[in-house]
Image (cartoon, rainbow, N blue to C red):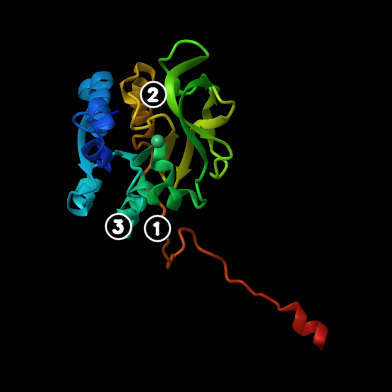
Amino acid sequence: MTDAPIRVTVWNEFIHEQTAASTREIYPEGIHAALAAALREHLGSAVAVRSATLDEPEHGLTSDVLARTDVLTWWGHKAHDRVSDAVVDRVQRRVLEGMGLLVLHSGHASKIFRRLMGTSCMLRWREAAERERIWIVDPSHPIVDGPEGEFFEIPHTEMYGEYFDIPRPDEVILISWYEGGEVFRSGCTFRRGKGKVFYFSPGHETFPIYHDANVRRIIANAVCWAAPCGSPYFGDGRRIEAPLSPIAAKHIVDESLHRKG
Ligand code: ZN
């Protein structure tokens, strides 16, 4: 074990906060600032948090920044198509190498999530400020260490409903029910290469969801869960010239030749 802090980069598209008063009122310094504060509040010196936004050069996700990122969190909505493919390639590569990735709310439609999942990642949605009841369906999972009870609620949310076109998750940790009747796999994990990916759906920009204590705790837990651990990355293919152990000479007889004779 090492005491080095988990290096987190909180990525935010950062458009709604600059263009919509309703979002700016909730997140005056941006969604990224609220998420960074949640991580510092729960993890203290165990985490070193930086943020990056779409309008920065290379969206703030240079090779150097990504090389020094253990866990990346992703919030985007209006401008998924403005994220450069070169940056998506770079993030994907880092995930395969072991960088953790938390995809939040409308990040379901981001280029990086769709790339990693290989499916449309589309879903049903409705904006009716309805109640969401989030059920913990994998209570032993470290991501749900904190909330008390079998479920917690968000009073006003955007509905995200099934069918959610993702590949079968490694783990479904949370399932949401909505006042209007839909359900949704709201907390799912995936492994890609050596990297761990967590999708967590709460977080619509016109509701103060990232100020909710349970939501903040889950995101902090997920950062710890997604932090790299274990062996180095072995995913690069390579030709093996010399075998590790001697291979006896083989005398392969092509049976088809005998049959012809
Ligand atoms: Zn939304």
Q: CA distance from mark 1 to mark 3?
A: 24 Å
Q: Secondary structure at mark 2?
A: helix
Q: Earlier in the sequence, mark 1 or mark 3?
A: 3
The residue shown at (17%, 53%) is: 57
Work out which residue is located at the far top of the displayed protein and give it. 149
Q: Quadrant of residue 84?
A: bottom left
Looking at this view, is 260 or 192 the one in front?
Answer: 192
Quadrant for residue 212, please give it. Answer: top left
Q: Position of residue 193 (x, y in %)?
A: 43, 48
Looking at the rendered image, the disc whose residue lies closer to the viewer, 2 or 3, is 3
Residue under circle 3?
84
User: Does the residue tagged 2 have its C-beta within 8 Å of any atom of ligand 1?
Assistant: no
Q: CA distance from mark 1 to mark 2?
A: 33 Å
State the residue at coordinates (61%, 71%). 250
- Which numbered marker is on residue 218? 2
Question: In which quadrant will I find the N terminus?
Answer: top left
Q: Secondary structure at mark 3?
A: loop
Which quadrant of the render holds ligand 1?
top left
Labels 1, 3: front one: 3
Residue at mark 1: 236
Q: Which residue is located at x 50 percent, y 46 percent?
A: 121
Label 3, residues with CA under 10 Å away: few <14, some 14-19, many ≥20:
few
Of pointers 2 and 3, the one earlier in the residue sequence: 3
- Amino acid type, callout 1: Asp
Residue 167 is drawn in which quadrant? Answer: top right
Label 1 secondary element? loop
Ligand 1 lies under 8 Å from the Cβ of mark 1 = no
